[in-house]
Image: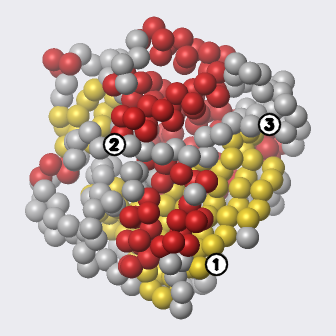
Amino acid sequence: MEEHGIIEPLGDDDVPEAAREVTSDYEPSDEETTFGSVTSSVGDHVWEYGRRYHAFRYGRYPIPNDEEEYKRESLRHLMLKEVIGGKLYLAPIGDNPQKIIDLGTGFGEWAIETVGETFPSARVTGVDLSPIQPHWIPPNVEFIVDDIEDEWVHANDYDFAHLRFVNTVIKDNAGVFSKVFNNLKPGGWIEIQDAHPAIASDDNTIPPDYAVTRFYALTRTVLREQYGFDVHVLERVPGMLEQAGFVRVERKVFHMPLGEWAKDAHLRLLGGYLREVLMDFVGVIAARPFVEAGMEREEIEELVREVGSVVGNRRVHAYLPIHFVWAQKPV
């Protein structure tokens, strides 16, 4: 079953190449993880294009892991909670899941909040390429630095697997879904939450030369050609889950206002969140992917300015689809 609709109100300066610096948050470790073997390189960072990136499997992931990115991820976390009325997920996982895995956990807010406020008796594992999560965490939360597209070892019997803003920036979604399926308990659930970068409106107020549309079109091309990502994969996720063996596949699509053009106060709040998240994302893509794709700095700066000049236009009633997809492993 699939639902669509407008959201209803619910109760550093550039661093020269010669001065690039590799830093580390974690002490070197050869610890065996749930996925594989962590080496001393997992805690390293590299500074490029004025931003900090992970150095583990360097080059695989073009999104920064610095303080600016933390602010963007925190705002996305708040935004999605607002969308679904303060909840952290929509899948009907029951009242007592005991093993939860958060794939692509980022800074770990979802994982920490899940056990701290919702399931204090559960064990939650967060997995990410970067060791950027807090050092002081609840005793039933663990974070692992690894690549979720690698083979999983000793990772089984999960009740719930969660992926948020992950699927559009990995190469092999079908492979990840297969790994999740194999490591869920019978009756366990998976949920995907992500934005589908297809700006639209219901009243044809988006102009033909809308800068946000051009930005997403260019981003789609660059991420596909430079990194092998498909930012439009969400269109196919339900079918891919079924192919992996999942049943009871559900999808709910929220039309998130871009900017504060809506009459409803709650929608205006969400639109303000998305406007800020989008502008931060434009900075992320401009910092590294566009440069590595060979775009000239003047061209990048002009596009950034154009996007910034239109996202606050209340005459343009644009929205971005946010997809929540969940499915169950057969009992």
Disc 2 to disc 3, C-alpha distance: 31 Å
Q: Is 132 positioned to the left or the right of 241 in the image?
A: left
Residue pointed to by mark 1: 248
- Please identify the quarter of the rendering in which residue 247 is found: bottom right
Label 3: few (<14), some (14–19) or many (≥20) C-alpha neighbours in 10 Å: some
Above or below, comparing residue 7 to residue 51 in the picture? below
**Which residue is rendered at x = 77% and y = 62% of the image?**
3
C-beta proximity under 8 Å, tags 2 and 3? no
Q: Nearer the viewer, mark 2 or mark 1?
A: 1
Instruction: Tell me the SS state at disc 2.
Output: loop
Of residue 327 and residue 269, the one placed in the foreground of this image is 327
Q: Amino acid at mark 3?
A: Ser
Disc 3 to disc 1, C-alpha distance: 30 Å
Of mark 2 and mark 1, the one earlier in the sequence is 2
Residue 65 visible from this viewpoint: no
**Which residue is rendered at x = 89% and y = 38% of the image?**
263
Q: Amino acid at mark 1?
A: Arg
Above or below, comparing residue 73 to residue 172 in the picture? above
Of residue 172 and residue 183, the one placed in the foreground of this image is 172
Quadrant housing the N terminus: bottom right
Instruction: Tell me the SS state at disc 3.
Output: loop
Q: Is 1 positioned to the left or the right of 15 in the image?
A: right
Of mark 2 and mark 3, the one earlier in the sequence is 2
Above or below, comparing residue 52 to residue 239 in the picture? above
Residue pointed to by mark 3: 201
